[in-house]
Amino acid sequence: MADFSAFPIARRWPASHPDRLQLYSLPTPNGVKVSIMLEEIGLPYEPHLIDIGKNETWTEEFLSLNPNGKIPAIIDPNGLDGKPLGLFESGAILLYLAEKSGQLLPGNPALRYETIQWVFFQMAAVGPMFGQLGFFHKFAGREIEDKRPLERYRAESKRLLRVLEKRLEGRQWVMGDEYTIADISLLGWVRNLIGFYGAGELVGYDTLKNVPTWLDRGLDRPAVQRGLEIPKRT
């Protein structure tokens, strides 16, 4: 049985199945990357709902695993050296799980790095820009009289969508015929942009061809459908 004594987070959110990977998350665009990945690879795991509305990511226990105070985070009871491994940052977790399982990351070194660059594209550009657009379009940012911030994030989000649109020309997935962690990293964010944020019209989503068909294809995957609802919100 795994020893989680070195992880204070496990005291606040105790493991019912300590032999399984522990997921601390919420079904946000970043959180669902990991739940979708886990559903795709079939690795047994136990999800714990972290309520950001109650500031649970800023508790001492959560910060002991992720000092940046963001979901998702994991503890793998069977880490690379056979000992429990704690990890945060969704992109790093995707890479770790892909390498651990031998799935959803090409074995060819050149294709492997090409896949990773698209994961970094999501982490460095798509997530931050779409998130800021959502804030200024849907949330408190709407009250700001100066519309330059909204326009900046609208224009950049529109540009990024067209980068993805160009990449998907003649491709079923970001890497061609092979569905990978690059797709998993992006699906939740594009879905959120046009769904929860309601920003489709702002970014001209209806003028795109490849991105919408790619998104529909991804959302049709049973593992994606399951992962989008994990952990269950209370």
Image: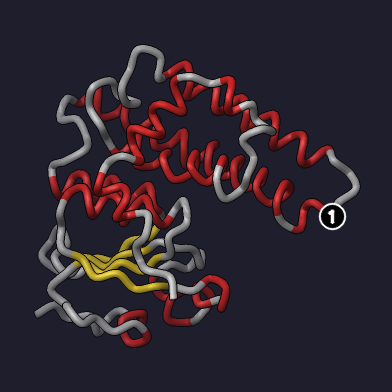
The residue sitting at the right extreme is 145
Which quadrant would the C terminus be assigned to in this image? bottom left
In this view, which residue lies farthest toward the bottom?
11
Where disc 1 sits, the SS reads helix
| x, y percent for residue 58 | 54, 75
Vertical comparison of 21 with 218: above or below: below
User: Horizontally, is 234 left or right of 226 in the view?
Assistant: right
Report which quarter residue 34 is drawn in.
Answer: bottom left
Residue 214 rendering spot, x and y as whole percentages: 38, 28
Q: Which residue is mark 1?
A: 143
User: Alpha-carbon neighbours of circle 1 within 10 Å: few (<14), some, or many (≥20)?
Assistant: few
In this rendering, position of residue 67 left or right of residue 149: left
Left or right, 114 with respect to 138, comes to: left
Give residue 177's position: percent from left, percent from top: 23, 22
Residue 50: quadrant of the picture: bottom left
- At 27% from the left and 41% from the top, the residue drawn is 221
Which residue is situated farthest in the top direction here? 170
**Against 192, is 9 above or below?**
below
